[in-house]
């Protein structure tokens, strides 16, 4: 049996609904599914854990900040 994603939205989401949801329960299978929180029946993108970790680190350190 394949585990079902257990979706969560960040507690920091207060930007009018422009959010994503992440299912962290599948990390053991090297998968991080991500979906649009406004379309819970829509598609999900899946990323390898290392790629997702690199992306989150870059966001946290301001790598994508616009001047």
Image (cartoon, helix red, strand yellow):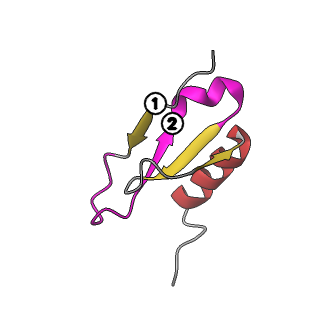
Residue farthest to the front? Answer: 41
What residue is disc 2 on? 23
Give the extent of the magenta segment. 11-31
When the figure is inspected, residue 31 is found, relative to residue 47, above or below; the finding is above
When the figure is inspected, residue 16 is found, relative to residue 3, above or below; the finding is below
- Give neighbour class at mark 1: few <14, some 14-19, many 20+ (Cα, 10 Å): few
When the figure is inspected, residue 25 is found, relative to residue 34, above or below; the finding is above
What residue is disc 1 on? 6
When the figure is inspected, residue 53 is found, relative to residue 30, above or below; the finding is below
The residue depicted at 37 percent of the width and 64 percent of the height is 18
Q: Quadrant of the N terminus?
A: top right
Query: What x and y, as percent, mark residue 64?
Result: 58, 70
Quarter of the rendering containing residue 17: bottom left
Q: Secondary structure at mark 2?
A: strand
Residue farthest to the bottom? Answer: 67
Q: Is residue 33 magenta?
A: no
Query: What x and y, as percent, mark residue 47?
Result: 68, 46
């Amino acid at each position: 049996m394949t585990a079902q994603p257990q979706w969560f939205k960040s507690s920091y989401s207060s930007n009018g609904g422009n959010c994503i949801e992440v299912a962290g329960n599948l990390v053991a299978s090297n998968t991080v599914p991500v979906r649009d929180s406004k379309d819970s029946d829509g598609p999900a993108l899946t990323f390898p854990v290392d790629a997702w970790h690199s992306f989150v680190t870059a966001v946290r350190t301001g790598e994508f900040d616009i001047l």
